[in-house]
Image (cartoon, helix red, strand yellow):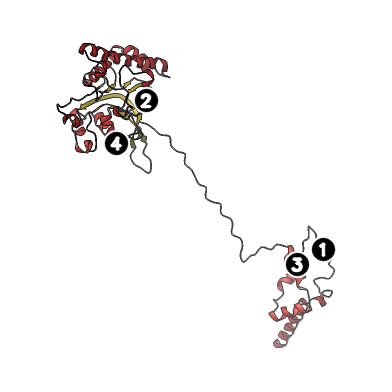
Amino acid sequence: MNWRRFLEKLFQVFQMTDKASQAPIQQIKVSQRGQPKTHEQSMQPAATERQKLSLKKTADSHIESSPLTENKLPVEPDGLNPEPSQIQVEDQENPLSPVEPEPIQVIEPELAVRYCATNGVWHAQYEAVVGLAHRTANPPLPCQDAALALVQPRPLVLVADGAGSSPVSEIGSLAVVTGIARLINTLEQQVAALLDQPGKVDAEATHRFALMLVKHAKGLLDDLAVSHRRPQNDFRCTLLLALVGSHHVLWLKIGDGALVVEKICHQPADKAQALPSLSPELRTLGTVGKGEFANLTTFIDNHLRPEDVQIGTLVSDNISGLGVMSDGAADRLVAQDGSMVAAQVSQWLQTLREDKLNRRTLTQRLYSDTFTKGTTGDDCSLALLACGFSYDE
């Protein structure tokens, strides 16, 4: 009995499969995609590959008798009911992976350059040495440079380089350096009114004051010419000067040589570095001459014009060092176009800031083989000012 019932049920299943195979393929697809499956459809067994082939051959002859198309209106293509070929079905086996957004590139703003604040405590040192070429002359020539660096009554550096073609230019350079320093000391109240006032500097008044210093320097050479009964050209020299006030710095340049200003750049400590980073920033002021014999050097003499004098001012905040030097020293310490300054200058300034730089050290360095090698053997002179500074941790 059990086998008989099993065969009857198996026969009924084959009949249901045969009726389902009468439906056209196109309508089956619409039913599967466009309509939800009924419980009967979900219970139908899948057709074999042989039945699928026979279904394609007999589909057209069984459309009217198919139970899936009875009592149903034909599907017309329009905008709301698209044809089966227009229906987009998502591929479940290969679903599109979600588009991952591109990582946002975070551009950190450039940090503004920070300079260490100075504490107003200045240190000064200077030296002038005769060039080796002058010592080989017969008779030997003296050093024609003169230099001076002072802290009181206010920080001041001066250098004068006597013209090599002038027989007694060493007398003129020394007279100009000492005489200008004395005049600035005498005019302290006028200097304070120009350089110690906050806000914008009085450019016109400062320019007049600088030209007055130049006029006084020329007068000193005129007096020497009278007292020595010699032409004024025998005493001519260059002049470089930097005068420091509490708010402004006045600088002046006649002829070749170099004026150098230093600031200390400061980068605070962070996660990347445990200690603050300090680095000196050096730059030159004014233009750099090429030397007397190239006919490009200007001297203090009867041919000097106001437009030949380079004059400028700086805000004294954050200035940690100043240096003036003759062309003999500048040839080794400053690039020909003034675009670069040797780190040796900052090393001297730091040693001076620690109150450890003496004139003996400068003399030894200026006469060292590494410093004199490849030079013309000219006189070398420099005057330095270094100020203490502080920075935030």
Q: Marks 1 and 3, Cα distance to the nearest angstrom?
A: 12 Å
Above or below 377: residue 24: below
Q: Earlier in the sequence, mark 1 or mark 3?
A: 3
Circle 3 SS class: helix
Q: Marks 3 and 2, Cα distance to the nearest angstrom?
A: 85 Å
Residue 214 point in image, percent of width and height: 32, 16
Q: Earlier in the sequence, mark 2 or mark 1?
A: 1
Tag 2–tag 1 contact (CB < 8 Å): no
Tag 4–tag 3 contact (CB < 8 Å): no
User: Residue 317's mark?
Assistant: 2
Above or below 244: residue 93: below
Residue 3 point in image, percent of width and height: 70, 88
Point out the frontmost of discs 3 and 2: 2
User: In the depicted view, which residue is nearer to us: 15 or 169?
Assistant: 169
User: In the depicted view, which residue is nearer to us: 128 or 315?
Assistant: 128
**Residue marked by disc 4:** 343
User: Residue 30's mark?
Assistant: 3
Image quarter of the N terminus:
bottom right
Tag 1–tag 3 contact (CB < 8 Å): no
Q: Marks 2 and 4, Cα distance to the nearest angstrom?
A: 22 Å
Residue at 22% across / 24% down in the picture?
144
Residue at 21% across / 20% down in the picture?
168
Q: Residue flagged by tag 3: what amino acid is it?
A: Val
Name, please, the residue furthest toward the left: 139
Image quarter of the C terminus:
top left
User: In the depicted view, which residue is nearer to us: 393 or 281?
Assistant: 281
Q: Earlier in the sequence, mark 2 or mark 4?
A: 2
Residue at 38% across / 24% down in the picture?
314
Q: Earlier in the sequence, mark 3 or mark 2?
A: 3
User: Residue 76's mark?
Assistant: 1
Point out the frontmost of discs 2 and 4: 4
